[in-house]
Image: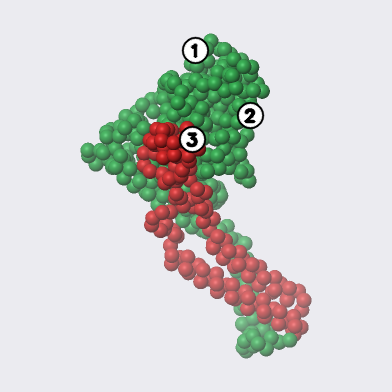
Amino acid sequence: MALPFFPLQFPGLDVTGPIGQVLQILLTAFFIGFIFFGQKLQMRMFLMEIDRGLKRLDFIRIQARDLTLKTVKEQGKPTADITPQINTLMEQFIIAPVDMDPSGIVRKFDHLLDVHDVKFKDDVRAIAPGASEPTLNNLGNLVEASWALNTIYRIVRHFYLLGRRTSSFFIILQLQALMPMVMQEAEAYMGAARAFAEGQPIGDGIGALVASRLMKDKAQRKVEKDVIVAETTMEDRRVIALKAEGPGGNVGKPGDAIRSIIEENQGKVSMVVMIDAALKFEGENSGDISEGIGAAIGGIGTERFKIEEEATKQRIPVYAVIVKESILEAITPMKKEILDAGEKVIERIKRLIIERTKPGDTVIVAGIGNTIGIGQ
Amino acid sequence: MAQGKPPGGGSVTVRFVLSLILAFIGLFSLLALLTGYDFIQQRRLDDAGTSLYLSLAFVTFLFVVFNIVRTRRGFSLTTVVPSKVLSVVQCTQCSFKQLKNFALGDYVTKAEGKCTQCGNQTLFVSGIFTEAGKKR
Ligand SMILES: [Zn+2]
């Protein structure tokens, strides 16, 4: 068959003829060229991909900054232009303590975070003099989300430019491989910024929400920094529930609070149950509940350290009930599945209490997480 | 994203030229594949020459297809569309329960005043949630 339908029969197009030869040489040249310059070509394409991501990151970061400016202006009623102060806040940093000699590093970290919190709050108060305390906390969270986006952008841009300038295939390769995760995180922070601007509860707040349900309409008092405690009874056990003070965006210092409650009770606490949101693995369902042992609390580790130390000293078992969610769900407005998990968590706590304690015992239930949009 | 169109990134002209070149190479390899097939049919080449010719053409064609697919895919991002946030208003004394749109200033445990069903001042916000964010 000579492919009569295909207009290929123009003169000279056979491999033995001159055009055929040229065709073959071209193809061979392309093939060999690809072997030698393939990597360069691939690098170009990776760079283009990163560039696209970087432009999007820039777009998101500016959007977050504009949202921050707008929200602070609306809710904080500043008297002067706050753009320079916001820009300063966007570039702030913390220098981690030296870890060559790690003994006592937790205390140093704790101190550092305290200083940062006080300074940061004062800075936010300065740009939002008209804001109430909860609003001030929300604005602080908003500025932090915006800061995170700015920092992500700066880091990605740094490695992009470094990779391009040095033509280092491996810097570019790593950046390109990480890009989808970075983008996902950036989108999550943007969602968080929107939630913070409006004061909506986020997925991470499920622990605080459960504690809030336990302590509703009970006598409440404040212990330690920004932590609210209330006593209630559950299955004839004395339950001391605690959470960060809401409804402003706040995580408080549950470590200090748990320690002081244990001390108040002279160590006569039968167990500590911690409720927190935890990152799920891909493929798991959001809002599923898991039970485990140990202090369920995120962050840099200072609070976890305090709880572990006190629990070990007094030989108190620490149980964890976690609600699974993705990083995106943890910092964007709370999803229905996660909210619905609240009731199930309370059932789990009841079961734990019945199984592991006797009537009349004292149990601490700590709702961990950002309490934005969740009062008590 | 709620407002504005995110920039696509990458120089448009460069990408246009690149895709033109890709398309050209693709067509070219397709042509070569057909020519090679024709040669086999006409038994005008020895076997080794034909297979080399064909495999070159085939690899080139695959390369083009692969690149086009890859470029089209880009970052398959899941973009969060800001979805509706709702507040659950409940009564502690009766079974009254209602969903309303989240309003600035709402928070869980906030007192919402008088219950329309039982008349007690026991309405409160019991939960705030968002419906599953749609993914692009
Ligand atoms: Zn009622």
Q: Which residue is mark 1?
A: A264
Colour of chain B, in one word, is red
Residue density around tag 3, few if under 14, some if 14–19, many if 20 or more, within 10 Å = some
Taking depth in this image into account, of A268 and A54 the one nearest to the observer is: A268
Question: At numbered mark 3, what does the secondary structure look like: helix, strand or loop?
Answer: loop
Residues at discs 2 and 3 in contact (Cβ within 8 Å) = no
Mark toward the viewer: 3 or 1: 3
Question: At numbered mark 2, what does the secondary structure look like: helix, strand or loop?
Answer: strand
Q: Quadrant of the C terminus of chain A?
A: top left
Q: Earlier in the sequence, mark 1 or mark 2?
A: 1
Q: Residue at x 33, y 43 (%)?
A: A71
Residue B94, labelled with which disc?
3
Looking at mark 3, is its residue's CB closer than 8 Å to ligand 1?
yes
From mark 1 to mark 2, how far is it between C-alphas? 26 Å
Mark toward the viewer: 2 or 3: 3
Q: Which residue is mark 2?
A: A292
Residue density around tag 1, few if under 14, some if 14–19, many if 20 or more, within 10 Å = few
Q: Position of residue A296 (x, y in %)?
A: 56, 29
Residue type at mark 2 is Gly
Q: Residue at x 27, y 33 (%)?
A: A129
Parent chain of label 2: A
Image quadrant assignment for residue A154? top left
Quadrant holding ligand 1? top left
